[in-house]
Amino acid sequence: KMDKDLGQHILKNPGVASAIVQKAHLKQSDHVLEVGPGTGNLTVLILKAAKAVTAVEMDPRMAAELTKRVQGTPEGKRLKVMLGDVIKTELPHFDVCISNTPYQISSPLVFKLLSLPNPPRSCILMFQREFAMRLFAKPGEKLYSRLSVNVQMWAKVSHIMKVGRNNFNPPPQVESNVVRIEPKFPRPQIAYEEWDGLLRIAFVRKNRTLRAGFLGTSAVVELLASNYRLYCAQHDIPVDDSPLDPNQSTTADAETETMDIDGAADDEFKGFSDPDDPDDELPDFFKEMQAAKKVNGANRKKKGRVSELVREKVRKVLEDDTKLADKRARLCDEGDFLKLLYAFNQEGIHFS
Ligand code: SAM
């Protein structure tokens, strides 16, 4: 009996299974991690090409079936089955990861693999088609998103092959693709939380200009201002956070209106906005900020000078330092976001 919640779609086409293992370019000395071995159709092929396999399987019935399948064979001695959720399991070191991935854990698995202290040489992973395509999408392509930039910062991603749904038993709802993810070595020295924090803001609406994304809503400025207050406190930087002159706050209001006009101009890019794109959803902090904004709006006079200072710093970074203010997030590449992060940090603006 198949358990739908575990994404149990057994690969029944032996040609596809052997193509996946072949594309892993295994060496006889390799230790391979297999995620979700199921009944072991990939596992037995990997065991032939590598030195050792650690297979992490959540379903005890599957784990038992796999153990039985290799019992008493010479290969069986080189297989270690770990029972449990791979996301919560402490993993041994391995050279290559191979997985017909249970689709529910696609994103956490990718980030777990990329954040290992000693990342593997490469990962050959099968995903649902759209998720796979987001992994290797380039700036300007429809599926280019926060996931694309994030993953491509830490790894080289390449497409290997399409796999139709009828190669599985039972067939899943959607088609699949196999990708290769090769973590960059040495690992780029960037704080993940900072990088991801910047991308979260930039991709709230990826068709908007960075100016609209960062300055168009007071929620974002307020978030950065509160980070800035914390940063100053931690670094003994004195700040004047006295209440703003009420006349001054009208400047901010005027600016917000300009941003809305900018937003209207985004209509020509409607073809790119994707209601199913999870990156187009507002992150939680943003929703909280919008709720807080109503309260703030009522107390506008109470907003301190730090908000205005931060607004000016952000404007300077976007317009003067990086000249990226008019660029849309969906067209920015990794280099653009790196430039932004560096310039923001130079100004003491942080995202975590
Ligand atoms: N590798 C087999 C194949 O290709 O035929 C099975 C692949 S099936 C798509 C996914 C497998 O992952 C299932 O055996 C399922 O029980 C297992 N699984 C689901 N969630 C898991 C998790 N969080 N950790 C480890 N294994 C998991």
Image: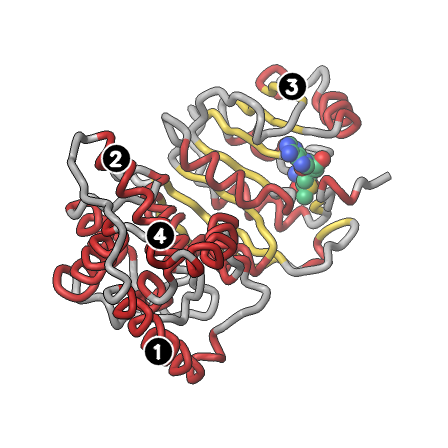
Disc sitting over residue 222 in the figure: 4
Task: Specify the quadrant that holds the N terminus.
Answer: top right
Q: Amino acid at mark 3?
A: Gly
Vertical placement of 64 versus 287: above or below? above
Name the residue: 35% across, 65% down: 329
The residues bearing labels 2 and 3 have C-alpha atoms spaced at a distance of 35 Å
Residue at disc 1, secondary structure: helix
Q: Earlier in the sequence, mark 4 or mark 2?
A: 2
Q: Amino acid at mark 1?
A: Asp
Give the number of the mark in front: 2 or 3: 2
Name the residue: 48% across, 52% down: 292
Q: Amino acid at mark 4?
A: Glu
Give the number of the mark in front: 2 or 1: 1
Residue at disc 2, secondary structure: loop
Q: Amino acid at mark 2?
A: Pro
Label 1: few (<14), some (14–19) or many (≥20) C-alpha neighbours in 10 Å: some
Task: Specify the quadrant that holds the C terminus.
Answer: top left
State ligand 1's quadrant.
top right
Give yes or no for contact between labels 2 and 1 (Cβ–Cβ under 8 Å).
Answer: no
The residues bearing labels 4 and 2 have C-alpha atoms spaced at a distance of 36 Å
Residue denoted by label 3: 76
In the image, taking residue 59 as reference, residue 282 lies left or right, namely left
